[in-house]
Amino acid sequence: MGSREGVDAVVCTHLHVDHVGWNTMLENGKWMPTFPKARYLIGRREYDFWSVCNDEVNRPGIRGGSNS
């Protein structure tokens, strides 16, 4: 299997917390991209939805939010 540095693109079809949690990892106490050389691609509608949803309590998929 190749290294994490060999990945050049990550496609996120949707941004539910349980699906994108692997996009970062804790290294030496600092959150870093799992694939440091990758370009992360996210659909416009998904990006727009999560960009305006800044209240953690009301975010779908977050415990206590409207869709959890």
Image (spheres, helix red, strand yellow):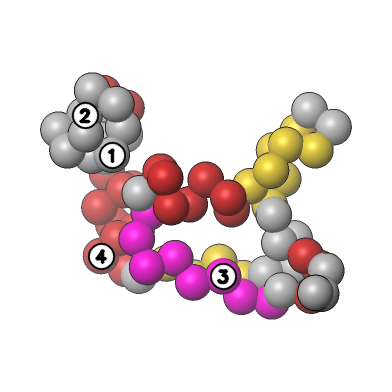
Q: CA distance from mark 1 to mark 2?
A: 6 Å
Nearest the eye: 38 or 18 = 18
Mark 4 or mark 3, which has the lower sequence index? 3
Q: Which mark is residue 65?
A: 2
Marks 4 and 1, how far apart in space? 17 Å
Dot 4: element: helix
| Label 4 vs 2, first from the N-terminus | 4
Q: How many marks?
A: 4
Relative height, residue 68 to residue 8 (above, below)? above
| Labels 4 & 3 near each other (Cβ < 8 A) | no
Q: Which residue is mark 3?
A: 10
Asked if labels 2 and 1 touch by Cβ distance under 8 angstroms, the answer is yes
Query: Which residue position holds label 1?
Result: 61
- Pointer 2 or 3: first along the chain: 3
Magenta range is 8-15
Q: Can you tell which quarter of the image residue 30 is in?
A: top right
Q: Residues within 10 Å of mark 2 (few under 14, many from 20)?
A: few
Asked whether residue 15 is in view, the answer is yes
Which residue appears at 29% of the width and 26% of the height?
Answer: 63
Q: Is residue 14 magenta?
A: yes
